[in-house]
Image (cartoon, rainbow, N blue to C red):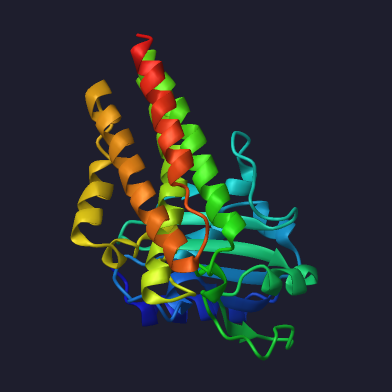
Amino acid sequence: MRRPEELFALFEKIAVEDQRIRAMTLEGSRVNPNVTPDRWQDYDITFLVTDVDSFRQSDQWLDIFGDKIFMQKPEAMELFPPDFPNGWFSYLMLFSDGVKIDLTLVPVSDARDYFEQDPLIQVLLDKDQICPGNLRPTDEAFWIQKPSETFVHDCANEFLFVSTYVAKGLLRGELLFANWHFEQILRKELHRMLGYLAGVKKGFPLNTGKHDKWLLPFLSESQRTQLLGTYRLDSMESAWNALYAAMDLFEEAAQEVCGALSYPSINGDAKRVRGYIKTLKELE
C-alpha cells in the first residue's frame, strides 16, 4: 500500500500542474482530530475547479492516481439519487494496493457553499485565496446534544409504535418485513436512546462517532450483551427474542434518561404497548 506522504505528493502534483484546479482540500476521517489514524482510512480529496464538465468528458485522466480496479460515480448513476448539489461530481475509486480515494470536483463558483456544508475540511492548496482562512476541522456538529423532553418522548413514541409493526410482521410469518422495520427504524431509535443514556452518564455533548461506532464503550457489559444480541434476526424465534431484548434495553435506558433529566417516565406507554403486542399474539 502506498504511504500517505506518497499519495499527498501525488495529489499536490496533479493539482499544481492542472490550471483548471484552483484549490484542493482534504475531508473526512483524516482531518478529524477524534479519529485514530489507521491503514484503512480513505483519502477524501476535493478539487475546486473552473470547469467540471471538461473532466467528465473522459475517465482516462484518472489513470494518474494509480492502478484503479473499481470505481463508482454516484452522480452518473440513475438508480440512486445523487447526494451532492447539481454540478458537483465525484469518483469513488479502489486501487490494487488497497488504497481508496474519494475524489470530488466542485465548481469554483460554489466555493462558499462547499465550505459551509462540511465542518471537516482542511485546505491543502489554494492558488487564488478562495478558501476561508479560519477553518478548524471539527466533528462537533455531529455530537449528541442534551435532548429536550420532546426529543426523548418522540424517540420513545417512534420506537414503541414501530415495535408493533415488527410484531405484526412476525405474527404473519413475514420475517423480512419485520426485520426491515427493526433495522431501519427500531434500531435507529434504540441507538438514539442509548446515546442519550451515555450522555447523562458521561456528560453532554457526547461523541459516539459515525453510525455510533464508538457507542459500545459507553454501555455497561450487560447492556452491550443485550444490544449485540439484537442482531440475531435469522429466524422467527430469534427475531422475537431480539424484539423483546430491544424493548427491555430501550425501556431501561429511557427510564434512566428520564430520571436523570427530570422528564416524565415512558413506562406507562411501554407497558401499554407490551400489552397490545400480547393481545396480538393471543389472536393467533
Q: Position of residue 236 (x, y in %)?
A: 27, 22
- Residue 245 visible? The answer is yes
For residue 57, side relative to residue 239 (left or right): right
Q: Quadrant of the N terminus?
A: bottom left
Q: Is residue 186 above or below residue 49?
A: above
Q: In the picture, residue 52 is in which quadrant?
A: bottom right
- Residue 2 coordinates in the image, percent (x, y): 32, 72
256 relative position to 104: left or right: left
Percent coordinates x, y for residue 16 in the rendering: 60, 81
Estimate the x, y position of residue 184 in percent, counting from the top left: 46, 39
| Residue at (50, 65) in percent of width and height | 262
Residue at 39% from the left image edge and 31% from the top image edge: 274
The residue sitting at 20% across, 51% down in the picture is: 225
Q: In this view of the protein, which residue sits in the foreground, 258 or 111?
A: 258
User: Which residue is nearer to you in this view: 204 or 62?
Assistant: 204
- Quadrant of the image for the C terminus? top left
Q: Nearer the viewer, residue 73 or 27?
A: 27
Q: Is residue 24 above or below residue 113?
A: below
Q: From the viewer's perspective, is residue 105 above or below residue 240?
A: below
Q: Residue furthest right?
A: 109
Note whether residue 174 is visible.
no
**Residue lying at the far top of the rendered structure:** 284
Residue toward you, 222 or 102 = 222
Q: Is residue 261 above or below residue 268?
A: below
Residue 11 in the figure: left or right of residue 38: right
Residue lying farthest to the bottom in this orientation: 133
